[in-house]
Amino acid sequence: MHVTDPEPLRGERAVLLDYLQHFRTTFERQLEGLDAEQLATRAVPPSSMSLLGLLRHLAAVEYSWCHRVMERRLDRPKMWGKDEHPDADFDGAVADPAVVEEAWTTWRTEVAHAEEWVASAESLDVLGDHPDGDLELREVLVHLIEEYARHCGHADLLRECLDGRTGL
């Protein structure tokens, strides 16, 4: 069936977008109500993974797939200085309210931009420019669903360690 819509979904675009919205919303709910210290708490040493790091990472994922790949602007720099430091999204996830606010603002901005871009795409056959070869929009959407689903699992475990909250 479908995830978020009470009516049966029809068509590939509707199904893909429904699943992507479900996982974006699930991820956002897993982080709600936490302060900067909790969001920046690292998973298990030596891992640099934290909920704030995941938020920054997913903002960078949204940015990269939409601006760089689908808009064919591979010349744009990667977010958070990842060109120079591949783990910058996680290493820069420090317990500072300003860093948290920047991460939320950036993630929401990039999600909104991606949603607008996808809504304006004439079909799922639209091609983006990727270093490994052109990709169809449908493949990018499936990748985003996979990325969010995987990180929702990480976020669920991290949240449970912080305050016992599960099942979001």
Image: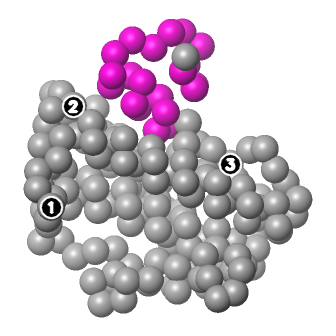
Residue corresponding to mark 2: 124
Q: Residues within 10 Å of mark 2 (few under 14, many from 20)?
A: some
Tag on residue 29?
3
Answer above or below: position of 31 versus 149: below
Q: Name the image quarter holding residue 73.
A: bottom left
Q: Is residue 10 magenta?
A: yes
Q: CA distance from mark 2 to mark 3?
A: 28 Å
Quadrant in the picture for residue 80: bottom left
Q: Is residue 133 above or below residue 83?
A: above
Identify the residue position indicated by label 1 in the image: 132
Name the residue: 46% across, 38% down. Answer: 20
Dot 1: within a 10 Å radius of its alpha carbon, few (fewer than 14), some, or many (20 or more) residues? few
Nearer the observer, 30 or 116: 30
Quarter of the image with the C terminus is: top right
- Find residue 134 and report its horizontal and vertical position in percent: 11, 51
Q: Earlier in the sequence, mark 1 or mark 2?
A: 2
